[in-house]
Amino acid sequence: MRLVNHLNEVLEIRVSKYTYENSTNQYFSSDALDATILIEKRESRFERELKFMDLEQIELLEKWFTLVSTTARHRKRLEFLDADLQCMKYTRGNISYMKVVFSDLYNQWTKPPISWDFIISKKNVHLIRMEIQKTLKEFPCRCGMQHDCFKL
């Protein structure tokens, strides 16, 4: 999933493979993914492996972004299983943004958090949904259960 914002800064979540190759129909481990996050801002580049990522977290991001863009009364923070990664909605003037924040909790005093902003618009909602659907087609659900993880 690769997104470029209005400042030409890049956010990329690269999913390389399933964490457990032979775990089909096991709800707790069959959809776990090996993923890395990449943020490029101006001349700096930040790349780090995500500790916990699975298909439900990716679906959750898509549904949260869609709901945040359509309704004003919705939870403005999305926290992932990986404690270092979270998304927030905030507004500057009349423009709403999604902010992706990646912080290293173990080294929070030596490494400041890295953030990436994305304007919430119809075009960007469509773009993020297409990128997520591309990832979900490449790595389909293997747990055998229907996901309905978005209950807030």
Image: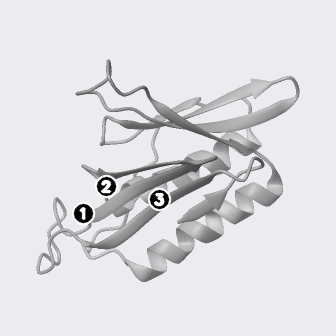
Disc 3 versus disc 2: distance between alpha carbons? 11 Å
| Relative to 120, 106 lies left or right | left
Residue 73 falls in which quadrant of the image?
A: top right
Q: CA distance from mark 1 to mark 2?
A: 6 Å
The residue drawn where x is 75% and y is 26% is: 91
Sequence-wise first label, 1 or 2: 1
The residue at 65%/50% (across/down) is: 9
Residue under label 1:
32
Residue 92, horizontal then vertical, whole percent: 80, 24
- Judged from the image, the secondary structure of the residue bearing numbered disc 3 is helix
Foreground of the two, 31 or 47? 47
Single out the residue that lies furthest toward the top. Answer: 109
Q: Amino acid at mark 3?
A: Glu
Residue with the mark numbered 3: 59
The answer to whether marks 1 and 2 mark residues whose Cβ atoms lie closer than 8 Å is yes
Mark 3 and mark 1 residues within 8 Å of each other at the beta carbon: no
Coloring scheme used? one colour
Residue 34 x, y percent position in the rendering: 27, 64
Above or below, 146 relative to 96? below
| Left or right placement of residue 89 versus residue 20 in this view | right
Answer few, some or many: residues within 10 Å of disc 2's Cα (few below 14, many 20 plus, some between 14 and 19).
Answer: many
Q: Which residue appears farthest toward the right when viewing the image?
A: 94
User: Around disc 1, counting alpha carbons within 10 Å, would you say few (fewer than 14), some (14 to 19), or many (20 or more)?
Assistant: many
Name the element at disc 2: loop
Which residue occupies the extreme left position in the image? Answer: 22
Report the front residue among 31 and 101.
Answer: 101
- Report how far apart the C-alphas of labels 3 and 1 lie in the structure: 13 Å
Q: Position of residue 51 (x, y in %)?
A: 24, 49
**Mark 2 is on which residue type?**
Met
Residue 53: which disc? 2
Picture coordinates of residue 8, whole percent (x, y): 72, 53
